[in-house]
Image (spheres, rainbow, N blue to C red):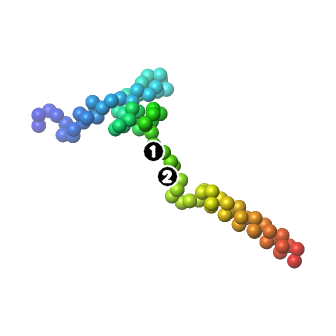
Amino acid sequence: MSGTHPRNTRGMHEAPRCGAQTRTGKPCQAPATKGHRRCRMHGGAKGSGAPRGNQNALKSGLYTADSLAMRRRVTQLIRTSRDIIEKI
């Protein structure tokens, strides 16, 4: 071996740095994500951060507007049914 590390880390060391202000007031020195100006943790700069739209909320559909409306209707039907049964 010629004294270099077997993994190529040169690209990461030469990557542009985040620069977001940390709690200590110093700039963040984490590498910026590819094509963005901030790192994966800060993402506050324009063009950084997560993609638009919360795709994680769509996995179960438990809290969609249709699902909430359906549960409200079922709850109301149950209440109405109990009232009718009590009157009988």
In the rendered image, residue 14, in percent from the top left (x then y), is placed at 27, 30
Amino acid at pointer 1: Pro
Q: Residue at x 65, y 59 (%)?
A: 68
Question: Is residue 79 depicted above or below 11 in this figure?
Answer: below
Query: From the viewer's perspective, is 57 left or right of 38?
Result: right
Q: Residue at x 23, y 33 (%)?
A: 10
Across and down, in percent, residue 17 comes to 35, 29
Query: Which image quarter holds the C terminus?
Result: bottom right
62 left or right, relative to 8: right
| Residue of label 2 | 55
What mark, if any, has residue 24 been given in the picture?
none
Residue under the point 43% across and 36% down: 47
Outermost residue toward the right in this view: 87
Q: Amino acid at mark 2?
A: Gln
Viewed as shown, does residue 83 lie left or right of 34? right
Kind of element beneath mark 2:
helix
Residue 15 vs 66, above or below: the answer is above
Query: Mark 1: which secondary structure?
Result: loop
Which residue is tagged 1?
A: 51
Is there a contact, CB below 8 Å, between mark 2 and mark 1?
yes
